[in-house]
Image (tube, grey):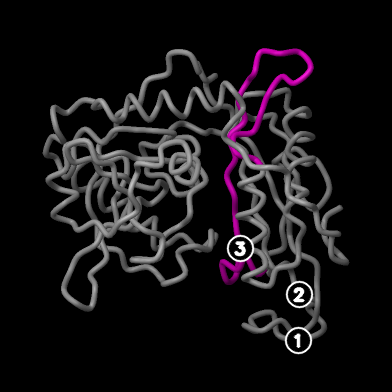
Amino acid sequence: MDPARATPHAPNLTVPSTVLVHLNGQLLPHDRAAVSPFDRGFLFGDGLYEGLRAFSTGTPHHPHRIIGLNRHIRRFQRGLDLCGIHYNAALLAPITEHLLAANHLHDAFVYWQVTRGTPDLTSGPVRSRVMTSPHPPTVFAYLSPLPPLDLTSALPAAKRAGCQRDLRWHLGHIKSISLLGNVIPAIAAHQAVAADEALLIRAMPDGRRLLGEGTYTNVAVVRGNTVRTPTLTATSILPGVTREIMLELDPAIREDEITEDELRTADEVLLIGTTTMITAVTHLDGHPVGNARPGPHAHRLMRLLCDALRENREDIPTPTPAPAPHGADA
């Protein structure tokens, strides 16, 4: 998960004035990149996105790495396939490298977006829900600088959060660019309690109120020495890459259904994400969580993650790339 879902108090990811972006196989100054107003991403929100984090390694031959790159590629390809958008997600790797090099950056957030593309205006109505003719996807990527990571002494950040009702669709595992269901609660939580993140609560048919995820993060709660994170299916949430990494690094983390009451009485509440990494919620709806400081499990899990990054243990083997479909970005 990533700053595409961020609240007004998310990390500053301002695009530099000289940034080069990737658009359909070209690197262009961002103010010269143009997408058709008839693109299905613009008209329907018909597309997917992925957020990557690059960080400096300090070595001349490999000056940076992408955290969990192959996990991101696998998730992105799975979402594209489910939506029937024909694009080879393995192209994220070389194009991201090209984009970083062109912008002379090693520490950066990299945003990818692939939409179903722009229909041929002569072949049918542009507002047709069903494509009337095949056309290539629109492929866009940009990056924003991030502060360098200190993997030897990084500490968990602290944020304020607020609870909001989850009114979104039931395909939360798809990283859709249609984010109005995230934006509205993020704004509401910020206005209500100056929250940096909104934690989404889904009302279930049996009357329970279950914690799902944040608007741009996964969530974990700590009670005693037990760390729990919501299952992917109870309220249909995104399978976050950092969440997946942490479940492997610490097998004691339990995937479970978590009620709103359990969230509100937790000893620690943690946010987990690509740029968030491990972040402690110090205040929930204006009330302190624990002692209102990052707790022992926030520090422990942050060390686990940083150790894995330093030792290059957080990723999976490179997926076997599929051939790019006709018309896809090469």
Mark 3 lies on residue: 79
Under circle 1, the secondary element is loop
Q: Earlier in the sequence, mark 3 or mark 2?
A: 3
Structural distance between the alpha carbons of marks 3 and 1: 27 Å
Is residue 64 located in the magenta-colored stretch of the structure?
yes
State the residue at coordinates (74%, 41%).
93
**Residue count near mark 2 (Cα–Cα under 10 Å), binned few <14, some 14–19, many ≥20:** many
Span of residues in magenta:
40-69
Is residue 60 located in the magenta-colored stretch of the structure?
yes
Which label sits in the foreground, 3 or 2? 3
Residue type beneath disc 2: Pro
Which mark identifies residue 119?
A: 2
Q: Nearer the viewer, residue 317 or 73?
A: 317
Under circle 3, the secondary element is helix
Q: Earlier in the sequence, mark 3 or mark 1?
A: 3
Q: Is residue 57 above or below residue 280?
A: above
Mark 1 lies on residue: 124
